[in-house]
Amino acid sequence: MLCINNFKCSLSEDETLLSEKLSAYLKCSIRNIQILKKAIDARSRKEIWFVYNIAFSVDNEALLLKQNIPYVSQYIPIPEFIIPPIKKIQSPVIIGSGPAGMFAALVLAQAGVCPIILERGPSIDKRCRDVKNFWHGGKLKTQSNVQFGEGGAGTFSDGKLMTGIKKDAMTMFVLKELVKAGAPNEILYISKPHLGTDKLVNIVRNIRAKIISLGGEYRFEHQLDDIQIQNNQIRLLNIKYNEDEQYELPVQDVILALGHSARDTFEMLHNRGVPIIPKSFSIGVRIEHPQSLINRAIYHDFCNNPKLSAADYKLAVHLPNGRSAYSFCMCPGGVVVAAASEKEQVVTNGMSYYARDGENANAALLVGVTPSDFGGNHPLQGVYWQKQIENRAFCAGDKSYAAPAQRLEDMLKRRSSVKAGEVIPSYSRGVVWGSMDYVLPTFVMDTFRLAINEMDKKLHGYNFPDAVMTGVETRSSSPIRIIREEDMQSPVKGLYPAGEGAGYAGGIVSSAVDGIKAALGLLQKYVD
């Protein structure tokens, strides 16, 4: 097959006629057309284009290639991901059922071993009920919330599948398995694929069913409480369930697919001598604009065209104070959600459904922080610092799990807010108006004030006076890294740190791929 990149169609053209348009452009008959990538080019105010990379077949490839048509070349497909089958071994244990844990389990199960997945939270259906109850004023359940439970933190998000890692056999394996589990086929080729929380719930459920059908075992509400190490080898897990009951589980291999909020587990691992170091992460707020404003800023006069989905953005600025600020996890047509996992702390996150049809756009507005900002040298100092900030947000929110909020104009003018303007906050537990200066460190707020107008130069309208800043966003990535070596193992043998919580990924796809790599590292010990 051949491929052509950068093939453009206007909004007025019908995608079902793509084959005919390409045939006319190449002046030859084509067949077996396959869209490899589809993106939107909205850089011009005069026209918006859908831009395609397309694979196709022709009768005489050599003749067409001799014409040196721009962007036409031989098609080199991404190779299939091959899982090596291995002999029977003791069931490996996976701690956590987020993307890293799920895909590690799926690879191990397909390899013929029978993984045991331990998840401190409940299954997806019970978890959804607990989360929605908390969002609507109910009690916070510290083991069943936006952070903990089947599917991991990404389940209650926009379900973004963009990733900075290379699109290779592993990433395609992840995307194809998501499609098999119910994701729309378009995620295989659109440039900014997303699933939405509503689709993710069913996808997570279906992947679990597949793992079980292949011999895997799930144990929900079973938390890793302690480990035993002998001769620098993991030997035993102490598991807690039903609040105060425990059992011991002998092990040879354990994949630590922890979420970034498993703070008690981080503490236990550190106390048991598992090497951990602090790492940089980011803190800030969720900022909400009218989605209509973002649509117009991106799509201009085409903003109401039904072929265009809700617009998104990605911003980053480097500032004279040496700091950087950037947007993260932008949720078009979404809501800001209560994402606390511990009592007396307020944490925010963003979420969209697949349709992305809400009134507001929201994104994290973050400032990068490094271990030198944490105020100590302990490996878990970033965790302790996060907790302090989240507790300040809890206190600023009247200690009711309401969130502190401030209008953007008021933040820039260093005054407290007293009420909403045009943008009504979507945070369901309510907000307490005031000043984010009482919650976030001074250097973060000063960086915001430097960043806003610079960001507005890149996205007109970003400095909208009534935009709402809701705090705090502190869980953008893990504040620690569990050390591992080239064979994917910790210096404690048999222990495989993986995914976002262990400090090696960020987002659904990169976490899933890292879980796959951990599984392959584990399997490598047993390949004949």
Image: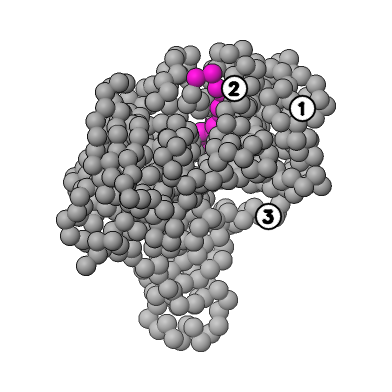
Query: 124 above or below 494?
Result: above
Crowd band around label 3 with a 10 angstrom C-alpha radius: few (<14), some (14–19), many (20+): few
Horizontally, residue 264 falls left or right of residue 114, namely right
**Looking at the image, residue 521 lies above or below residue 404:** below
Identify residue for label 3.
43
- What residue would you read off at disc 2? 391
Residue 297: image tag:
none
* Foreground of the two, 23 or 247: 247
Position of the N terminus, as image quadrant, is: bottom left
Instruction: Where is residue 117? Give x, y as percent.
Output: 28, 40
Give the overall secondary structure of the magenta segment.
loop
**Label 2 residue SS:** helix
Above or below residue 160? Residue 141 is above
Depth check: 18 or 106 in front? Answer: 106
Which of the two labelled residues, at mark 1 and mark 3, occupies the earlier sequence position? 3
Q: Which residue shows up at 33% across the image and 58% down it?
A: 520
Mark 1 or 2: in front is: 2
Residue contact at pointers 2 and 3, CB within 8 angstroms: no
Q: Residue at 45%, 37% (x, y): give it.
A: 271
The amino acid type found where label 3 is placed reads Arg
State the image coordinates of residue 372 (x, y, percent, origin top left): 68, 42
Q: Which residues are magenta?
A: 343-358
Res 507 visible: no
Q: Is residue 328 left or right of residue 62?
A: right
Q: On the rendered image, what quadrant is the C terminus found in?
A: bottom left
